[in-house]
Amino acid sequence: MDFGLTDDQRQIQRTAGELLAERARPERVREHAEAGRADVELWAELAELGWPGIAVSEDHGGQGLGAIELSILCEELGRSLAPVPLLPSVLAATLIERAGSPEQRERWLPGLASGETLGALGTAVDATAELVIGGAEANVIVLVEEDGAARVLAPEQVEVSAVASIDPTRSAARVEFDPTHPDAGEALPGDVAAGIDRALVAISSELVGVCERALEMTVAYVKERRQFGVPVGSYQAVSHRCAQMLLDTEKARSTAAFAAWAADADPARLPEAAAMAKAASADAGREVTAGAIQAHGGIGFTWEADVHWLYKRAQLDAALLGGSKHHRARLTAILADRLTASTAA
Amino acid sequence: MDLTFTPQQTAFRDELRVWLAENPPEAKPTEGGEDAEFAWRRDWQRRLYDAGWAAPSWPTEYGGRGATPAESAIYFEELGRARVPFSANTLGLLLGGPTLMVWGTPEQKERYLPPILSAEEIWCQGFSEPDAGSDLASLKTRAVKDGEDWVVTGQKVWTSGAQFSKWCMLVARTDSEVAKHKGLTYFLMDMEQDAVQVRPLRQITGEAEFNELFIEEARIPDANVVGGVGNGWKVALTTLMNERAGLGFALQIRLRQLLDDAIAAASVRGLLEDPLYGDALAELHIRCESLRLLAWKGLTDAERYGQPGPEGSLVKWLWSDTNQRLTELAVDIVGPEALTAGTDWSYEFLRARGNTIEGGTTEVLKNIVAERVLGLPRLKVAA
């Protein structure tokens, strides 16, 4: 039992944290969010550092590192809210790498790993995905359909129309394809579910970063803000809420760490671990960022205070690939199967 | 990150597992009340002792195995998994012994440690008082020096096992002139004297797990001061820090077993297909797993960095809250019959109500998290 990061992993964490603290300052995030565009300079820099391909195999131009390293980056990106399309790109890459054919991997992964190709992942109902994060500028889109199958589509095979989500730190689009058309993308022939579970680990890690930042901002604020002559953080109604925010965050962090570890070291446990991580982090993301707005009082409800970006990011991430209730329903099925197996044994 | 046991830890676990499988405790007595139950637990501890399993985390020089904190956690997980009773002298093994190892004189260690291990002398804990619960340092039991002895008068409460105990870890005020934390001294009080009266404290489950102690001029020789006069707060903190360290792992496994029982009960009634029950059970599963991860992370971080992370304060809070939710859900699943007196669920349901109070109330734990982990300012209260 060892929850510690290796020296290399710690180095990645430190470098990423320092870089984003410098390059994705709140005012810069706000500037891009308000203008509704990605930070292309920062994206170029991250691509140069190999971030988009951190977990893509070396054969396909990536760094060949694991889910733990990817989750470290996602956590830092969530913490900073950097307006770059890293998460949607790595989600697409994860699905293609895990479930794609050799030809599909060869075609898409090198570009996704280098950052030259932008990816996006969405869920489609009746051949339409109403909100695909990163879809507007994506060069490759993976859509998961109702039956659990997934297909990979190039932009010319879909109709993409930009959509504004409540979170302007990332672009979004409505994506539609014509399933009767002979050229409606290609099915991913492999294990789509395993790909989705790995994607869930990345999303959960981003949510953990969002929670951490929301809690830090809140603690700093309630120490400073005074009412009735004392810091509001000295009132237990406020401080106990902050304690609850920490507990929620740690619940999300511990399950996300377990899922990242399982993705690399114990894939048999990944479905359970990923469902737990996404359920815990989706709930934590929403609760903790809502708590942050509440603890900031009136100022927290203004556009000017930066907490709302975290709140909005948390909603999008929480909804992505299923919210907490969806994943608890998955877990219930896993628990029922386990019970049946143990009774039979 | 490696969330598996090392070969050494696995070997330790397997050795214990085999021993537990081959040496199950006698069945819990159904007659004879508390005395019979206590004798059963004492007998169980003696069997652990004979096989060298009474306190693996104690150093070998004191009769333990010098087990690492991780092995000690495995020990409690396995005891929980095997559903064996708690050792009769749990407080001596977990609190008293380790406190003496830190603060005791060589003579005290030699005199007191062996009979703790063998369950010959049972220990209890005299900390809380009717007017000093969460605010322990405000305790009023007084000890006054009289020749070679201290004379103690006061009242203690929540002393589990007092009726069976030979020694009481007693914190008393020896100086009321100084700040409240500074005037305390830690004693080992002989329970076998008329000046100490034990009265059972009946709790909402109907049983009397705890007692009240009425102390009227009890005598304690000066040689039974632990850690020096006026140093009682520090010594008491050592005891309190040990309080949750190992037991937490056993309680967590019990929680897991209760959850598995609840899932099985839901399955039998077709309720696993009901999304409302399914959702609640899945949430409890997440909490159980998160608890396991947080407890292990706290332990390994403590080994790695020399100090525990924020997890320690969170684990007890999350455990107690989860146990309450779980037993409530179990009653919903099983129906009114779960509330029949004497059933396991009715007992677990009522007993869980104390979880958020004993060993630090949830409100105090939240204060600790807010002040010590998050660094929030403390609300100024009248001294």
Image (cartoon, rainbow, N blue to C red):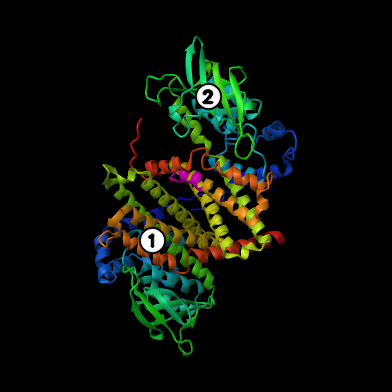
Any magenta on residue B229? no
Q: In the image, which residues are magenta? A: B308-318
Residue type at mark 2 is Gln
Q: Is residue B311 magenta?
A: yes
- For the C terminus of chain A, which image quadrant? bottom right
- Element at badge 2? strand
Q: Total of numbered circles in the picture?
A: 2
The chain carrying label 2 is B
Classify residue B89 as left or right of residue A121: right
Side of A277 relative to B41 (left or right)? left
Q: Which mark is residue B155?
A: 2
Q: Is residue A149 above or below residue A345?
A: below
Q: Tell me the amino acid under the disc marked 1.
A: Leu
| Foreground tag (2 vs 1) | 2
Where in the figure is residue B134, as x and y percent of width and height? 46, 34
Dominant secondary-structure state across the stretch colored magenta = helix
Where does label 1 land, which residue?
Answer: A73
Check contact, mark 2 vs mark 1: CB within 8 A. no
**Could you say which is closer to the camera, residue B72 or residue A162?**
A162
Q: Chain of mark 1?
A: A
Under circle 1, the secondary element is helix
Q: Residue at x 70, y 42 (%)?
A: B19
Q: Position of residue B317 (x, y in %)?
A: 49, 45
